[in-house]
Amino acid sequence: MRITFPYMGHSHWVFRQLLSELGHEPIVPPSPTKRTLDYGTRYSPEFACIPFKVLLGSYLEAIELGAEAVVTTGGVGPCRAGYYAPLHQRILADLGYEIDIIVLEPPLRNMKEFYRQLRKLIPPGIGIGNLLCILHRAWVKLNAIDHLERLSHQIRPRELERGRTTRVFRKCLELIGAARTVSEINVAREEGVRLLTEIPIDREKELLKIGIIGEIYVVLEPFINHNVQILLEGMGVLADRSIYLADWVRGNALVPGEKDIKRAARPYLKELVGGHGLNSIGETVLYARRGFDGVVQLAPFACIPEIVAKSIIPSVSRKLGIPVLTLFLDEQTGEAGIKTRLEAFVDLLLQKKRKGAGAQWNQVTWA
Amino acid sequence: MESGYLGIDVGSVSTNLVVIGSEADVLASVYIRTQGNPIGAIQRGLIMVAEELADRVEIKAVGTTGSARNLAGVVVGADLVKNEITAHAVASIHSVPGVKTIFEIGGQDSKIIILRDGIVTDFAMNTVCAAGTGSFLEHQATRLGIPIEKFGELALAAKNPVRIAGRCTVFAESDMIHKQQTGHRVEDIIAGLCEALVRNYLNNVGKGKELLPPFVFQGGVAANAGIRAAFTKALGTEAIVPEHYMVMGALGVALLAKEEAESRHGFATAFRGFAAGKLQYQVGSFECEGCPNRCEVVNLRMEGKTLAYWGDRCGKWSNLS
């Protein structure tokens, strides 16, 4: 089958390999652009959130490239995202595309259903041993990509030549993308580490530390969040992202995880509020404990779980003394508004940090 | 020649220029309409300031702010480019020492800034909706056929302000039209609109913030007596409107430029001089096809020569300049 999947950050390198090793033809949707957004907004209900619209747009683009089926994940708890796959399917059907959407719900919640859906993807010829090998390779690849990306985020705020890390990291992704076997992936990973650590950096530079939290899709897909992590890094900030796909898979699909996050959230929120609402609270607490200077919350406009989190965050913020900036993201492609808020937030954090030490307003400028 | 420090704030609706002297006293202040042409507005502003003081003041440093701050920075040759939230806070602290809450309502943006002990501890800005900004008030004034300058005066003449929905400007507008069609007096509608705007602003932008006096109210909308009265009513106390409330962003960035010049040894300004008001500038843009990001890259040329590129994420173009 020609199968497509949601485009999210750099994960397509993994899904591409996984699907082709299962004997399918992977149709990689183009990375989201204004065209994706045009398609998505044209055929989505107006009130749907931005992840819904971008996904619909990229499914349509993938269909143009010949996709016959979509594989995606389901949502957890009281969040609209749980209904998104059936809704996507209906919209596509109304547009005349009879596309099968295979929804993989987190297996820890319903193993049987997960297996039933997964069966659709596995051709009869593949034995269990072989299947495990294929899954293992994909897992190794995903971890390698996350590892290199994490490293790039350590290096970028210190780079001496602007843009160098981004270019090198793109090269790393190509290396990993081309590697097939576990040993090839490991070689590519080491080569990537070498390339990244060779970038000239300023080791002495003092960096602010900001954590990025929020709804998974807007956190992971730079097109929607205006590259917020890289924007912050350009302002001399060590920006740590709370979600990496490998961690998320480990915590939601393999072993029950994220317990520390839920425990940290407990004094403020005990209930699952859907999506990543509970995580947003817990992660804010954890970042405060780890001595971060601030937190940026990313939320799709009108996302209920994140709205719930946003209304609780001020009390976390007051109690633990960690400033939080919430950015609601929607269709806007203009970056200026986001930049202004981030710059002002960075100023605020610098001020706070230097409060005792004769603070000067203009110690940092970004011309 | 006297030393002067120039601050330029290029916003969506207005472009403001302020020159301060060595004692941080305001020597010149200009407020003009941006009218969708930021470069033209900056140039007109420069010419106006030059006419006023070019023969007696020497510009030692320049700062830019506002949504077109980067563009403005390249056009005039700025020493410092700063976001408008910080610039507004600096000007406010300078004008009203001890300020704890700043309400700033401009043409397209409204923000709230919380300060404690002279530093910003929290801020918020309207996000997806432009409800409750100067543009909306202006639009309604035009629709009612009232000059915006008369708006405040009329609001104060209201006897029974009507209740108008504040959540969204689209709802507010239809609510207003309904009230108008049922025969309410225009004064009462305007006063109701002012109250709705303030209510909306405090509930939306100010949500979850601890609002403590002294309050400062600045930005173009602070000129409106109706809005000022609505704030007093909602807060139970008056918000201070500083003398230069219209040009606080420009004042703030002028103060920052002055500080920058004075704190650095051997500082020399990058200012192109008031002559920049008469040069030929052209902007162009293109979509970079170097990678799937497809960044919209802008390039600015002065007298046919490229000055700068920006808008790319990787530095491929912006590193050229």
Image (cartoon, coloured by chain):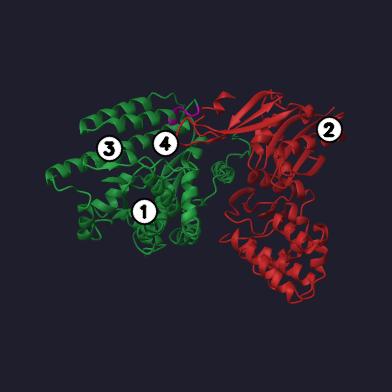
Chain colours: A green, B red
Chain for mark 1?
A
Q: Which numbered disc, 4 or 1, marks the residue that appears first in the sequence?
A: 1
Front position in the image: B7 or B36 = B36
Query: What is the secondary structure assignment of the residue under circle 2?
Result: helix
Amino acid on which the number 2 mark rests in the picture = Ala
Amino acid on which the number 3 mark rests in the picture = Lys
10 Å neighbourhood of mark 2: few (<14), some, or many (≥20)?
A: some
| Image position, residue B207 (x, y; %) | 57, 61
| Image position, residue B237 (x, y; %) | 72, 65
Amino acid on which the number 1 mark rests in the picture = Tyr
Magenta range: A162-166
**Mark 3 on the same chain as mark 1:** yes
Q: Residue A141 got which mark?
A: 3
Q: Is residue A112 left or right of residue B261?
A: left
Residue of label 1: A97
Query: What is the secondary structure assignment of the residue under circle 4?
Result: helix
Task: Give how far apart the Cα atoms at labels 3 and 1 are.
Answer: 32 Å
Residue of label 4: A153
| Image position, residue B292 (x, y; %) | 45, 35
Front position in the image: A46 or A329 = A46
Q: Is residue B263 left or right of residue B279?
A: left
Name the mark nearer the viewer: 3 or 2: 3
Task: Give how far apart the Cα atoms at labels 3 and 2 are.
Answer: 62 Å
10 Å neighbourhood of mark 1: few (<14), some, or many (≥20)?
A: some
Q: What residue do we see at 83% from left, 61% from top?
A: B150
Chain for mark 4?
A
Please say whether residue A164 is one of the residues in the magenta stretch.
yes
10 Å neighbourhood of mark 3: few (<14), some, or many (≥20)?
A: many
Q: Is residue A45 above or below residue B52?
A: below
Task: Give how far apart the Cα atoms at labels 4 and 2 are.
Answer: 46 Å
